[in-house]
Image (tube, grey):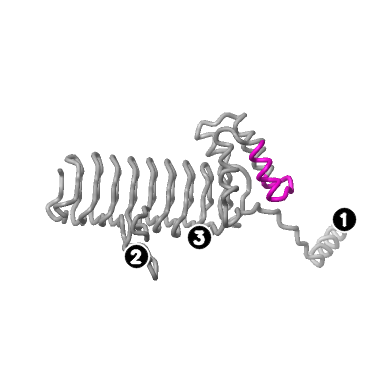
Amino acid sequence: MNIHPTAIVDPSAKIAEDVIIGPFCVIESDTVIESGCEIAARVSIKSGVYMGANCKVFENAVIGGIGQHVCPPGPPGKVRIGSNNTFREFCTVHRSIKEDGFTEIGDGNYFMANAHIAHDCVIGNNNIVANNVMFGGHVHVGNRAFVSGGVAVHQFCSIGSYAMVGGQSHITKDVPPFVTVDGLTSRVVGINRVGLRRSGFTSAQIARFKDAYNVVYRQGLSWKETLETLRTQFNQGEEALLYEMLSVSTRGIVQARTQPSLKVNMGELEQESSDDSAAA
């Protein structure tokens, strides 16, 4: 192991032979760090953390801190992290507040500086989470979502796979799969075509996603009618993710942005008309 002499590593921690641990790190007991991981300076990895292979943790990140809960129900749980994840500077990941629970992070995720993953979050695979994103407790994120800088996600909300959430959005309801949320209004503005293309979907598949989107946001159906249409007509492959999320949603979904009405100052309009007449 390549452990800097200023690092403090509990003797009971299970660390693979090729792990790199930088200066002034603290690795507590009851931790597992698998092969290929690189831990930069001043990182704290707390008790109860399992970290899969080939993860990179940058300066001053804290992985496995106690959940920020005023009245936790008992001893804390653990953090379970997959492989090939990146945690940039000052990221924080908190343990479950349930003794037998986990905060879970899958594989291939990229968390930029100051991202916060609260207790009992469940994050899928290959997501990009930009600077200063805040996930409240129990937030679920699917796969290949992009969450832009400064986004705040309320506890117990979900972000569907292939969704794109614009910068500084405030998310208080579930974000359906493969949609785009506008950062200014925090409302849905269409499907995430760019993200879907980058994920390898064909034009025909993207058209199906658009049809499913229209069922939810354009046809004016009741909630029951919407779910039944999705269940019966969009039940194959990734398009079925929309029904799967909506059918179990308890918070409701982010609504579509509506075009603002054009407000005209009639006095200014009359003045422009007079000016035009005088010029003629």
Q: On the rendered structure, is 78 left or right of 210?
A: left
The residue singled out by tag 1 in the image is 280
Query: Which SS class for mark 3?
Result: loop
Q: On the rendered structure, is 280 left or right of 166?
A: right
Residue type, mark 1 in image? Ala
The residue at 50%/34% (across/down) is: 199
Q: Residue 154: which disc?
A: 3
User: Which quadrant, please, contains the N terminus?
Assistant: top left
Q: On the rendered structure, is 138 left or right of 257?
A: left
Query: Of 233 and 116, which appears nearest the observer?
Result: 233
- Upstream in the sequence, badge 3 or badge 2? 2
Query: Of 64 and 204, which appears nearest the observer?
Result: 64
The residue singled out by tag 2 in the image is 74
Look at the image and tell me whether residue 133 can be seen. Answer: yes
Task: Please state the horizontal and vertical placement of residue 238, each as a whole percent of the image.
Answer: 55, 36
Question: What's the CA distance linking mark 3 and mark 2?
Answer: 23 Å
- Upstream in the sequence, badge 1 or badge 2? 2
Q: How many marks?
A: 3
Magenta part of the chain: 216-232
Query: Which SS class for mark 1?
Result: loop
Residue type, mark 3 in image? His
Q: On the rendered structure, is 68 left or right of 8?
A: right
Task: Please state the horizontal and vertical placement of residue 270, each as a whole percent of the image.
Answer: 84, 64
Seen in the picture, residue 265 relative to 195 is either above or below; the reply is below
Choose top left, top right, bottom left or bottom right for residue 233.
top right
Q: Are marks 1 and 3 in contact (CB under 8 Å)?
A: no
The residue at 65%/52% (across/down) is: 256
